[in-house]
Amino acid sequence: MDPRAFLAKDHQQKTEAEATWARGALRESGAARTVVSGGVDFPEVGAARPVVSLRTSAMNETLGDARLHGFQSSSELRVLDGELSVEPRWGVPRILGSRLTLVGYRTLMPELPQQQRSFSDSLGWGAEARMSTDIDRPLPYRASVEAEALGVVAASERFDTFLAVGLGAQATMAWSPFETVPSVGPRLSLAHRTALPGPGNSALRLEATYVPAWRAGLTPGFTHEADATLQVEWYLGRVARWSVLLTPRAQVHWEGTLASWAGPGRSLASLPEGRARHRLALGVELR
């Protein structure tokens, strides 16, 4: 084999692969992102209600995003990422809740094989600090910090498609004007992304978490919280310097306790008691 011909062919193949990736990647970084969405809430008590949400981010680059400028797709960074949800009505809109991620970081990239000294070196990791408000909670205000180790079950070369599971811990402080309740417990998570065909880095995402926590306060005991979000990010095109995406989303949230129940055979079973919320939303995102 002619070595010069081999190197020339290898260079051509790599150049074509990079050009193909660049055509489907986002040109801009994740700085200054805005999402406006409208949808419907289905609370456990009461009728369905319309919801309008505004989400803004100083920095929001999520796992799997392919960018010409920004972090690599195996890493995620969110800074001052906040969302405000209101119920539109005559007069002043009713605030339903808010969420603010002060800083959050996740990476699926482990240490290089030659630098792995222990099992933890083959894992990714993540950490986050956030605050939230929900008027339907008995304790509407909440601040939490979390950290987790991430194991990649399957992933493509550039992480545009991946499946990862996480195991970590979460500490939360919930309060109202009359009571403050700390809690701490393990955190289980699942993150999946599937790249969709077409330009603009379109994708289907699934994020799910489960947190059983020991709660202190006047009524100590275990509480359970589960959350799952399925979202499509579909690239529509560019307007001026902005990329426009359509982001339909379905979200399920449940939190409560497991109560004992004596069945027909007098055996004890654990049944969930708490509150659930279902939300369907259609958003338009500017990147």
Image (tube, rainbow, N blue to C red):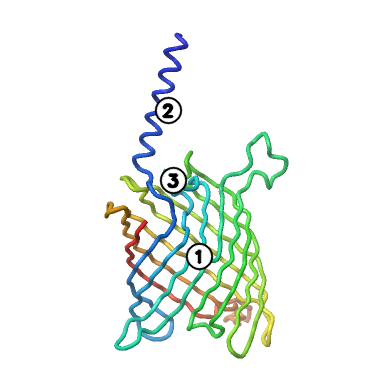
Q: Callout 1, which amino acid?
A: Leu
Q: Residue at x 62, y 70 (%)?
A: 212
Report whether 4 appears left or right of 283. right
Location of mark 1 (residue): 80
Looking at this view, name the residue that lies furthest to the bottom.
Answer: 178
Location of mark 2 (residue): 14
Location of mark 3 (residue): 69
Measured in 3D between alpha carbons, the distance from the residue under mark 3 to the one under mark 1, in whole angstroms, is 20 Å
Dot 1: what SS? Answer: strand
Q: Are marks 3 and 1 in contact (CB under 8 Å)?
A: no
Measured in 3D between alpha carbons, the distance from the residue under mark 3 to the one under mark 2, in whole angstroms, is 20 Å
User: Sequence-wise, which precedes: disc 2 or disc 1?
Assistant: 2
Report whether 216 appears left or right of 106. right
Measured in 3D between alpha carbons, the distance from the residue under mark 2 to the one under mark 1, in whole angstroms, is 37 Å
Q: Residue at x 67, y 75 (%)?
A: 214
Indicate the position of residue 29 as horizontal and vertical percent values: 43, 51
Q: Please identify the quarter of the rendering in which residue 188 is found.
A: bottom right
